[in-house]
Amino acid sequence: MSPTLHVATDPATALDAAFADAASHAEPLPERVCYLTPSREDTDVARELWTTHGTPLQLQTTTFDGLVDQALERHAFETREHALSGEQRQRLVEQAVDSLTDGHPLATNGAYAGAGACQQAEDLLSLLEFAGLTAPDAIPVDDRLQSLPDAITTALHELSTAFDRERTIAATDPTDRETLRSERYERVIDDSSLLETALTNTDAIVIGPQPFFSPLERRLLDAVIATDTTLIATLPLATAASEPSLAEPLTGVDQGANRAWRTYRQLGFTVAAASDAAGLASHLYRYRPDTAPPTLAAAGVRWETYPTPVHEERGVARRVRQTLADGHDPDELLIATDGPDTSRTLYETCRSYGIPATVDQSCSVAETELGSVVSLCRTIAEGGATLETVRQLTATPLTAP
């Protein structure tokens, strides 16, 4: 039986149809249906939808990484602790970027590279890893990279070499290093018995909606199809009502899912359109952060913004570490946050960077006299002040009339 792709203009409708399909193939036993999520997202909606088709115990949820880990643990007895964690990988990438010599595009003039350069390096290494290029010497001779300028290929080779060196240094046993995600994928894909054992008691796998698959994820899907497990996928499309054909490329707003559409076509999926009354418009909204406010350079304040909270945590920790490396005493540094949750997160991040941090959560920044003055001055500098703002500023004990 060929795998099925359920499409609908509403993601919930497509998933509901996929669950109905999976329920028809599953026995009424625990964990007979596996919902493969694109990421570690909240699965409450999926679990609630499933209750209309089967018992809660019938459904298990995991990710592509989780499926690979499960296969290695159940058959090869290789625990997840043997895998290189996300945090460990981040630190190794940072150390690799810090060690790059002058002339490399990502090399830094300071003691430590900035968060932006580290993120670029991490993205590049991820692309190389999921293209199967984990060995530095494979990069210059790979046919897929022949069209790149020599300077770019050389830079990629030097970055990969630096990361590989840091990974060996960090290993307790250099001959038995922690495995990369791609290496774990390759092992499961190449040994069919691993996946067959992991899916012995699984009747159907439902893939959550995602616009594309990495090369290794695509190969993992191909390996799943080779087993006896029924494979079902979902994809929200604005043109779902017209019953699109996999033989034709997607158009309009659906073009963003063309890579997944192409993968489903190559893997031999058949399309089933689910009818629904809801449109896709409400699902197209994506939060866009406002641009950074004017800097406070005139007041000697350095203003930095980050695209995500994770970037901010890493950026702040690396800034503090660089400041300490410049000779400043740890007692001279203060990280002011907007609440206890942020304080705890930054504390843990700083500790992971080897920074001797402590937490004082007696009050928020805005509740201090200095924090109040800074907030009022910022309001005035941005042109949003009123007479009351000026009155409050002059009334504080830190300002002279």
Image (spheres, grey):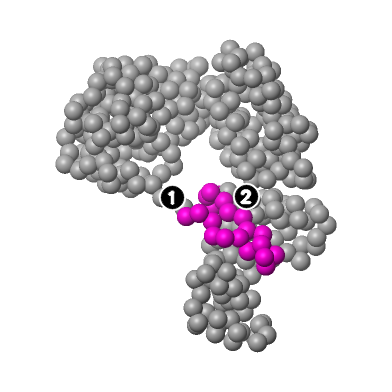
Q: Is residue 374 magenta?
A: no
Query: Does dot 2 land on a helix, a strand or a loop?
Result: helix
Looking at the rendered image, the disc whose residue lies closer to the viewer, 2 or 1, is 1
In the rendered image, residue 376, in percent from the top left (x then y), is placed at 56, 75
Instruction: Determine whether, in the image, residue 103 is placed left or right of residue 315.
Output: right
Sooner in the amino-acid sequence: mark 2 or mark 1 = 1
Look at mark 1 in the image and give the residue it sits on: 288
Which circle marks residue 314 in the picture?
2
The C terminus: image quadrant: bottom right
Dot 1 surroundings within 10 Å: few (below 14), some, or many (20 or more)?
few
User: What residue is at 62 percent from the left and 50 percent from the top?
Assistant: 314
Instruction: Determine whether, in the image, residue 175 is placed left or right of residue 224.
Output: right
User: What residue is at 54 percent from the left and 25 percent from the top?
Assistant: 130
Q: Is residue 335 above or below residue 258?
A: below
In the rendered image, residue 122, in percent from the top left (x then y), is placed at 61, 36
Q: Which residues are magenta?
A: 290-310
Q: Foreground residue, 42 or 114?
A: 114
Residue type at mark 2 is Arg
Q: CA distance from mark 2 to mark 1?
A: 21 Å
The N terminus: image quadrant: top left
Q: Is residue 306 magenta?
A: yes
Query: Does dot 1 land on a helix, a strand or a loop?
Result: loop
Residue type at mark 1 is Arg
Q: Is residue 69 above or below residue 218?
A: below
Task: Give the prevailing secondary structure in the magenta stretch.
Answer: loop
Q: Foreground residue, 176 or 381?
A: 381
Q: Quadrant of residue 110?
A: top right
In the rendered image, residue 216, in percent from the top left (x then y), is placed at 48, 23
Q: Quadrant of residue 339?
A: bottom right
Residue 231 in sight from this viewpoint: no
Q: Is residue 5 above or below residue 59?
A: above
In the rendered image, residue 139, in percent from the top left (x then y), is placed at 64, 19
